[in-house]
Amino acid sequence: MAHEWVFDSGARLTVAAADRLGEHVVRVHAEDTHRILRAAIPTHVPDRTPALAATLRAAAAHRPAAQGTIRFHAAQAARPAWIEAIVYDFDRDPPCDRAVIERALDRIVAIAVERSCAAIALPIDFGCPHGGIGGEEWLEILLASLVECRANAHAPPEIALIVAPPDLAASVRRVATFLNDHGVSSA
């Protein structure tokens, strides 16, 4: 089960499970300034002094990415293109806020249009799990972005909100209710 809404700008908003998205979809990954969320934490670290020394040198040289940084990563051998969005800064409290998410979404849509991406996919809770915004506020930001795109005469690609399969039906109902309450009807 997935549901789609079409906006006056021609933009489409879809709520779907990740495994239902095609290969053409450019996924957006929410990340933090130190990239802790994406880091692969080894379960076993070999007892090798040179490797430990190299790891410590790398850690000392690490410079965090700036919050608000948005990077497009082109497709490589086995990995499709993706967009990295640095939206969390765990040195702040809260680590994320509405202004950060608004700027990030504006830049993500701009990159998608510049790169002629057919579709982008964001987590349905983009900016919410570790941030200072809730699910309804995220949907307000997303809706405002889609309306602004129409006002600026550039249509964004299809935007898919990724949901875990067990939560799909409830998420579709939640988004449908929110959009209907804001005057947007489904396709």
Image (cartoon, rainbow, N blue to C red):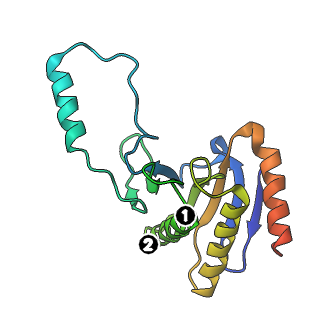
The answer to whether residue 1 shows anywhere in this view is no
Earlier sequence position, callout 1 versus callout 2? 1
Q: Residue at x 52, y 69 (%)?
A: 109
Instruction: Answer left or right for 113 relative to 183.
Output: left
Q: Residue 25: image x %, image y %? A: 55, 54
Using the image, determine if residue 21 lies above or below residue 164: below
Q: Residue at x 66, y 54 (%)?
A: 161
Q: Which residue is label 2 attached to?
A: 114
Front residue of 84/88: it is 88
Front residue of 64/170: it is 64
Q: Residue at x 68, y 56 (%)?
A: 134
Query: Identity of the amino acid at label 2?
Result: Glu
Q: Residue 72: image x %, image y %? A: 40, 59
Front residue of 18/51: it is 51
Q: Residue furthest top?
A: 47
Instruction: Answer left or right for 177 relative to 106.
Output: right
Q: Residue at x 57, y 48 (%)?
A: 130
Instruction: Answer left or right for 100 relative to 125.
Output: left
Query: Dot 2 surroundings within 10 Å: few (below 14), some, or many (20 or more)?
Result: few
Kindly report which numbered mark, 1 or 2, lies closer to the viewer in this rendering: 1
Question: Residue 101 shows which numbered tag?
Answer: 1
Label 2 sits on a secondary structure element that is helix
Q: Residue 154 occupies which quadrant of the picture?
A: bottom right
